[in-house]
Image (spheres, grey):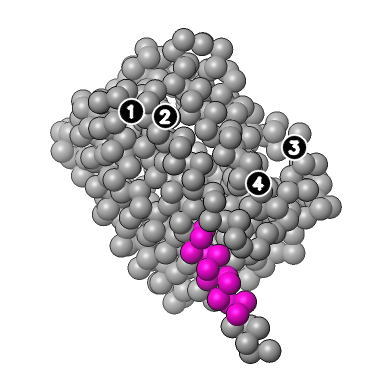
């Protein structure tokens, strides 16, 4: 019996390693180009409000796709979902390279990416929650972030160089090839299926669950702060730096600076310091968002990006550890994971139109300042997650 337990633990460790490798390759491929997409749209001549509109279409499409494809998801394993997500993300990146010539792709590509996000995120979280050791989940989440940061720290810089030398279209193609290779390690390990009896009302029930309300509020903060960090901040930083290669270098340095801190934070999370670490890191990250309103030089903004990335990484390791602990403690893991994904995109479908309105009516400088303050507010919602600690 001891042999089988140890053998099972060995397989779980090998599966976790495969997941680390997969997420590292995926993030490297996406890191070459994803963060540059708002800048790509900007250089195509799109106004800020229209760039935000593109991301609103992604979230709107995600909600529709979730409930439309739910009967199909019931029949798929976690590994198959991740594998099937690849053609969609590859089509998305290749389509971006042609959007200048085929304007209708602006309305098609959000739906393509939404299907990719649905399949991959649900499959990945289901796989990780099943493979992670409950006693050391903080360290495993920290190791995942550490591996990802180390593997991808050169991606933004290389992406910036590639765009400068070869242009966006060829860089999209190169990223697509890497994404295809990323999923292969996962097929050597056990599969997990979404619950075959999962229904729409199961997803909605988790959204309405009063026990999870504080964690749900923190999820709203995560979803919308990430949109400002992914759309508005990179564009602002690029405009301040003024060079795509230097911009990529700053992003890479931010990844390097946060690489070690993520594993340390994961260790502290397992030692009973998760709530305290989350509290201090959240306040620090929110303060950095506010501070950005008062900075004036490109060097200062670059420094705030590095500091903000370190603080945000600490928040995400502790918060993600809690996410997986809750997922493992609940009897309906699949429905919980799906409910979180739906939550993020429902909240974005409400928030992004408001952000679009601000981008349309405010001068550019005022819009950026307002966005940073809004991000600071959403960041503070992470503190609510500390109120949910009796489910596991």
- Residue at 47% across, 58% down: 20
Is residue 118 shown in magenta?
no
Q: Earlier in the sequence, mark 2 or mark 3?
A: 3
Residue 69 badge: 3
Q: Quadrant of residue 43?
A: top left
- Residue at 41% across, 72% down: 267
Q: Which residue is mark 1?
A: 235
Q: Which residues are magenta?
A: 7-19
Q: Nearer the viewer, mark 1 or mark 4?
A: 4
- Residue at 66% across, 53% down: 78
Secondary structure under tag 4 reads helix
Viewer-closest of 147 and 294: 147
* Residue 381 shows in this picture: no
- Residue at 43% across, 49% down: 25
Q: Residue furthest bottom?
A: 2
Q: Nearer the viewer, mark 3 or mark 4?
A: 4
Is residue 18 shown in magenta?
yes
Secondary structure under tag 1 reads helix
Q: Earlier in the sequence, mark 2 or mark 4?
A: 4
Q: Which residue is mark 2?
A: 172
How far from the left and from the top, in percent, is residue 302? 22, 40
Secondary structure under tag 3 reads helix
Q: Nearer the viewer, mark 2 or mark 1?
A: 2
Compute the Cα span from label 3 to label 4.
12 Å
Main secondary structure type of the part rendered in magenta? helix
Q: Which residue is mark 4?
A: 81
Q: Earlier in the sequence, mark 1 or mark 4?
A: 4
**Image-based side of 106 in relation to 375, left or right:** right
Vertical relation: 120 (above or below) 15: above
Compute the Cα span from label 2 to label 4.
23 Å
């Amino acid at each position: 019996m001891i042999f089988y337990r140890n053998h099972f633990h060995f397989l779980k460790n090998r599966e976790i390693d495969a997941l680390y490798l997969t997420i590292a390759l995926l993030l490297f491929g996406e890191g070459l180009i994803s963060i540059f997409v708002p800048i790509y749209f900007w250089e195509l001549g799109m106004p800020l409000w229209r760039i935000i509109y593109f991301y609103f279409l992604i979230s709107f499409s995600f909600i529709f796709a979730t409930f439309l494809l739910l009967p199909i998801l019931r029949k798929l394993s976690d590994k198959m979902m991740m594998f099937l997500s690849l053609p969609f993300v590859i089509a998305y990146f290749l389509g971006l390279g042609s959007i200048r010539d085929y304007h209708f792709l602006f309305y098609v590509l959000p739906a393509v990416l939404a299907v990719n996000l649905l399949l991959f995120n649900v499959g990945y979280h289901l796989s990780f929650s099943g493979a992670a050791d409950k006693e050391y989940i903080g360290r495993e989440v920290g190791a995942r972030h550490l591996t990802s940061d180390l593997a991808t720290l050169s991606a933004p810089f290389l992406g910036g160089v590639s765009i400068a030398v070869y242009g966006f279209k060829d860089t999209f193609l190169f990223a697509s090839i890497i994404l295809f290779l990323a999923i292969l390690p996962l097929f050597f390990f056990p599969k997990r299926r979404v619950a075959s009896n999962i229904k729409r009302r199961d997803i909605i029930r988790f959204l309405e669950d009063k026990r999870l309300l504080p964690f749900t509020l923190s999820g709203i903060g995560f979803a919308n702060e990430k949109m400002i960090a992914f759309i508005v901040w990179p564009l602002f930083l690029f405009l301040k730096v003024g060079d795509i290669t230097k911009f990529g270098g700053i992003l890479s340095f931010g990844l390097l600076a946060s690489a070690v801190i993520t594993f340390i934070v994961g260790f502290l999370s397992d030692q009973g310091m998760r709530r305290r670490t989350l509290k201090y890191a959240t306040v620090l990250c929110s303060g950095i968002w506010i501070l950005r309103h008062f900075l004036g030089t490109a060097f200062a903004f670059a420094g705030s990006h590095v500091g903000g990335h370190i603080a945000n990484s600490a928040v995400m390791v502790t918060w993600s550890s809690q996410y997986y602990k809750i997922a493992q403690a609940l009897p309906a893991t699949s429905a919980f994971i799906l409910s979180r994904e739906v939550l993020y995109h429902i909240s974005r479908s409400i928030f992004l139109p408001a952000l679009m309105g601000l981008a349309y009516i405010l001068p550019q400088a005022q819009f950026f300042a307002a966005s940073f303050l809004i991000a600071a507010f959403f960041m503070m919602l992470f503190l609510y997650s500390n109120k949910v600690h009796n489910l596991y």
